[in-house]
Structures are given as structure tokens and as C-alpha cells.
Image: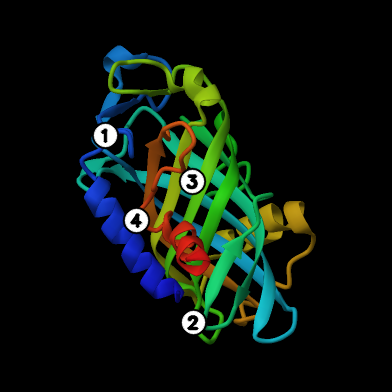
Amino acid sequence: MKLTKALAVASMVLTSAAANAEVFLQNWKLDADGAAGAGAAVVVSEFMDLIGASYIETSGTPYPNFTFKDAGAFRVAGLDGTSAAPSSAEITAIFTGTGTGTLGGAINFDTTSTFSMYSDTAFDFGGTNGTFGADNGTLIGSFKLVLGFGEVNATGIPNGQLTLKFLATDLLAGYFFDENGIDLSTKVADELLFGFVTTNASYTGNPTANVRSEIAGELFNDAFGAPANTNTPPGDFYVSNNGQYRWSVPEPGSLALIGAGLMGAFGIRRRRTAA
């Protein structure tokens, strides 16, 4: 089954399962600075909106197949697509990962990819403190990748959706709560999942000086070594991202669908192939 068809089937599966409150955490609570507790936390109906920037380098294995290295920084820009981000602290994050792909086809992220989230009262995302102002706050969550995929066009430039599902390995108490006020840090052992979906990952032809120096020159360099930093796709390029973060606790023995119905795509494809 082709990827696009698998994604469409996955979306239908999610639609039929949308009534199941266990698919996503709903009406969960966020205390951005960790000071007030669940009682004064902001209620999030479903998701946090994110924006950010990434730097990616590829190498042929051979053409049109490639491997890639990816480093990015992100911040929460709002809640549920309609509400402003919390004013007490900025929720930021950094991502470093590797993977494989095919020009004009699919991207697959390695499960060695990691994601770290911070609470930053300095509100300096996009600056030069820490790395891009994204990792100089309080570390409130550490995650490892379970599944990640997307697509690229024939030039090697992402322009669409990327979907990543992480398993929470550590959460700091006092920041995230379920709808009943239970701290999510106590649910890490329950295989708490964190979905990261970019609804638009677009090539950036003219990245700012801070994006070049902080994302490529520092974050990417620390993770993978000196970058080419020429911004010449498909060899290396910058990407602007926007999308969503979601939480889910899967039923025992199952993988919850996370994001826009994309998480089930590969499982569905495997089942169809086996059949």
C-alpha cells in the first residue's frame, strides 16, 4: 500500500475512534512555570500549538535514497489553535535526530532521536541565550522517539507534514496534569506518549543570523559536528515548522493514534501487506 493511501486509511481509523477519550488526553492542565499547581493551571482542551526552526543535512546512500541529521528548536505559540500561550513562562524544546528517506518519497526517523522540553521565564526564544533561547530554562520533560515519519518532494525539501511520537522518559512534577488534576509525572510508568505533528514544514531560503548561528552552528554542531551551513537543498537546508503537541496514554498492549491520524499509517500498511 502506498504511503498516501495508508495515511488516508489511518485518518478514517482515527475518525471512527475519536469518541474514545483514551486516544488523546483532553482538558488536561498546564502550569507553565510550575509554581501554581493544578488548581491554577491553564486548561488545554486538546493540544499546544508550536512553531520553530530546524537545520537538516543529508547524504546519499545512494541517490535517490539518503540519510539525514536533524536539529531543531521549538516553542509553544498558543493553545488549541485559538488561545494565547501562557504568560507565566515560555514552553520551549530542542530536538536532535537522524533517519533515512527517499527523494519524492517517505522520511523515517530513527528511534535514537530525542526531544527535551523546558520552562523558560526569560521569554528569549529566538535569541542567543543557551541555544536559541530554547534550552536555557528548567528542563521539565525528556522524551525518546517511538515512531517518526513524513514525506519530501523530489528536491529533498520538506513541505508538508512530519509526525513524531515520543515516549516520556522523565517529567518534572508540577507542570502537566490530567483533567482530574493528577500530575502527569506520576504516569510516566504508564507509557505516557507525546505526539509532535508539524502541519507545515517548509524550506526557509533566508534564515536569520540567529537561526544560522544557534540552530546550525551550535545545536547541530554539538550533536553531529560542524555543519555545511550552505542552505543548498537537498544537501543541507533550513526548515520552518508549525504544528501541534498532544498527550496520550495508550490502552495496554496498543499504540494510540497520535496527531492527525498519521500514527496508524505504518501499522495499517504492514497489516495490509501481511494479508
Is 198 drawn above or below residue 91 in the view shown?
A: below
Q: Give neighbour class at mark 1: few <14, some 14-19, many 20+ (Cα, 10 Å).
A: few
Q: Residues within 10 Å of mark 3 (few under 14, many from 20)?
A: many
Which amino acid, by three-letter code, is at mark 1? Ala
Secondary structure found at label 3 = loop
Disc 3 target residue: 125
Mark toward the viewer: 3 or 1: 1
Query: What SS does tag 1 mark?
Result: loop
Viewer-proximal residue, 105 or 185?
Answer: 105
The quadrant in which residue 114 appears is top right
What residue type is disc 2 on? Answer: Asn
N-terminal of the two: label 3 or label 1?
1
Q: Give the crowd class for mark 2: few <14, some 14-19, many >=20 residues within 10 Å.
A: some
According to the image, label 2 marks what residue? 153
What amino acid type should be assigned to the residue bearing mark 4? Gly
Q: Nearer the viewer, residue 257 or 31?
A: 257
Query: Of all residues shown, which one is farthest toward the right?
Result: 225
**Image location (x, y in percent) of residue 231:** 61, 77
Mark found first going from the N terminus, 1 or 4: 1
Q: Is residue 135 visible?
A: yes
Q: Which residue is mark 4?
A: 261
Alpha carbon distance from label 1 to label 2 = 35 Å
The image position of residue 153, as x and y in percent, is 49, 82
- The label shown at residue 21 is 1
